[in-house]
Amino acid sequence: MHRRRAIIGAAAAAAAGCTFAPDVDHDGADAPRALPLAQAPQIAWVLSSGGPRGFVHVGVLKALDELNLKPDLIVGASVGALVGCLRASGVPGAEIETLALELQPTNMARLAIWSDQRFSGAPVAELVHRYARKQLLEEMPVPMACVATRKRDAAVVAFTAGDAGVAVQASSAIEGQFTPVRIRGEPHVDADWFAPLPVRIARTLGARLGPLLFQLPPNFRKDTGRLGDLLAMLPRDLRVAFEFRHHSWFDDDVYALLRAWNGALCVADTEKGTTPLIATADFGYLRLRDADYTDDELAAWAGRISTQGWRDAYVFFKHEESGTGPALGRRMLRSLADTTPKM
């Protein structure tokens, strides 16, 4: 009798961590849907996939909260969809951080019985249902798009309405590992093969994109042919910046090529030196990589920026665990506000 009870208990414990019907078809009224947004967004936060490492998004969200910045749209893939969905529903970054630190693997997956894949992502949907402050994507304070791939034709789909938990589960269903999520008869998996960083989706939904940065390795010497071919492939309305790390690139023919395509020369201030401050586009792109800057140093940079005639300037500080980046950003904004362009 005792042995029988032990076997039944072990079976029950194992069953608690399993899903016996992983291929449920979500076809009800609240099943996720890909619908146009009610209002075209201007600013979108795009959160990529990345597995457990994708929870670094939480630190970025906390910094953005500190600056009191709010988007018109959040677009997320896989873990980016999970983190983004919680934030879009109204959960502050600090609370998402607490949740992320407490998560265990069993909170994210369950063994899938009678399935070709090993795991079911149903716990992910349950997690969203438990912690999100709104259950339907269209009711969230910030519009949210969860990006997944439709298996039939490999089409990238952005769910913007319906059950948020199921949408996140579909976006997080790693192909070959997790059971696809069936929505209105169509199996969906994560978009990692086609849109791990779904910037194009944000653009399709109407968001205005910031510049795209190309960082070249230090051993990559000047090749204006390749640079020209790349520039010709890019959409003309997409702002692009280039960070060259080999000295051969800092040459007049490179600057002329960038000007022809409105491509910005990234100005990088690092411990190894500073890139020449040369305007090649109608916007500036600066990466100020010192761990700290004095007020005088920031004022000097603000003065240089204000004299370039740029329509916009994008300034990025080094991301440190101590959170000095957002503080430097606030100080730079004050320095820019106090700077009068020299005539």
Image: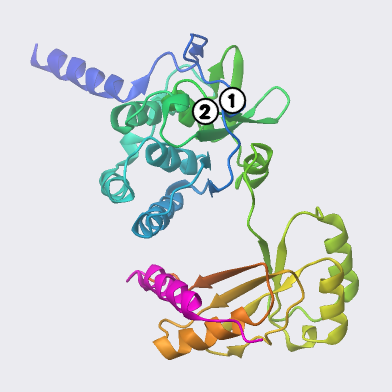
Q: Is residue 272 above or below residue 258?
A: below
Residue shown at the point (52%, 20%) measured from the top left: 32
Where residue 72 appears, as percent x and y from the top left, is 51, 42
Q: CA distance from mark 2 to mark 1?
A: 6 Å
Where residue 89 appears, as percent x and y from the top left, is 38, 35
| Stretch of the chain drawn in magenta | 321-343
Residue placed most toward the observer, 207 or 114: 207
Decide whether the magenta segment is chiefly helix, strand or loop.
helix
Disc 1 residue type (three-letter): His
Residue placed most toward the observer, 307 or 257: 307
Name the quarter where the C terminus is drawn: bottom right
Where residue 193 appears, as percent x and y from the top left, is 65, 41
Q: Determine which residue is flagged by label 1.
A: 188
Instruction: Say if mark 2 contacts mark 1, CB within 8 Å.
Output: yes
User: Mark 1: which secondary structure?
Assistant: strand
Q: Determine which residue is flagged by label 2.
A: 170
Q: Is residue 76 above or below residue 10?
A: below
